[in-house]
Image: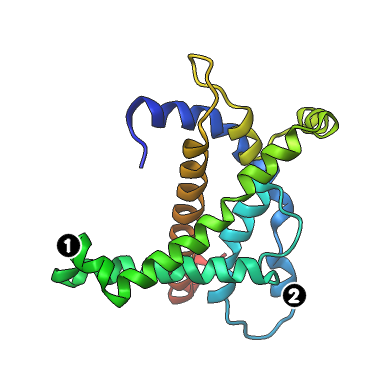
Amino acid sequence: MLNGKKWFQHQWMLTPAFYYDILKPYDKWEQLVDQDCPLEINQHIFLMPMEIIIKCAFSYQGSVQLDGNFRSYSKAIGDMTHLVYSRGIHGFHQSNIIYNLSSDGRSFHRACQVTHEHTGMISMRKAQLQNEGELEKVRKKRYLDFLDILLFAQTEDGNSLSDEDLCTEVDIFMFEGHDTTGSGISWIFYVLATHPEHQQ
């Protein structure tokens, strides 16, 4: 986790990735609503923030919901979330030694490995930016995505972010962003469904 001056510097550098105009093209829900039949939306709610984050932050062009790699990532995030809550309930799991030897601890570490494999996109993008043509193309974009901002960003003292800082930012952004947002949206829809007078 980041805090203090380092957190503030990173927030200042990343703000341009979240302009409203960048987020507009990712509205696919209108198609689902036009079907005029009951719709189970819970899975869509939890995948939507992940898809938005991956498309906006990393310029991913495919569909997260159809790509098997992201399904494994989504499952790993779900497993990690469940295991974190579970660890908080079990007193013996508070010890790292005991937790790491338990089946939950091993499952947690496997899930972490899956999520860290997806941060490999950082080194891939860095390699792409070594190509002058790609570098110029990125610099001409109206808005840079999250990963490009991280790669081009410099702290006030002129240093670029280290690979470890880049991976930390990506991990925090991915893990914290979509699960919390999905839960919040799900709750809002539930409350709206129980209070139809406020739906309009």
Instruction: Say if residue 46 shows up in the picture.
Output: no
- Which residue in the rendered view is the most extreme toward the right? 133
Asked whether, in this view, residue 97 is left or right of residue 106, the answer is left
Which x, y percent locates residue 47? 58, 67
- Which residue in the rendered view is the most extreme toward the top? 157
Please state, as top left, top right, bottom left or bottom right, where the N terminus lies in the image.
top left
The disc placed on residue 34 is 2
Going by the numbered disc 2, the residue's amino acid type is: Asp
Which residue position is annotated with label 1?
95
Which residue shows up at 45% across the image and 48% down it?
Answer: 172
The reply to whether the C-beta atoms of the residues labelled 1 and 2 are less than 8 Å apart is no
Tell me the SS state at disc 2. loop
**Vertically, is 33 above or below 8?**
below
Which residue shows up at 67% across the image and 65% down it?
Answer: 64
Which residue shows up at 48% across the image and 75% down it?
Answer: 193
* Quarter of the view holding residue 9: top left
How packed mark 1 is, by other alpha carbons closer than 10 Å (few <14, some 14-19, many 20 or more), is few
Which residue shows up at 26% across the image and 71% down it?
Answer: 101
Instruction: Give the number of the mark in front: 1 or 2.
Output: 1
The earlier-in-sequence mark between 1 and 2 is 2
Tell me the SS state at disc 1. loop
Q: Nearer the viewer, residue 134 or 59?
A: 134
Please state, as top left, top right, bottom left or bottom right, where the C terminus lies in the image.
bottom right
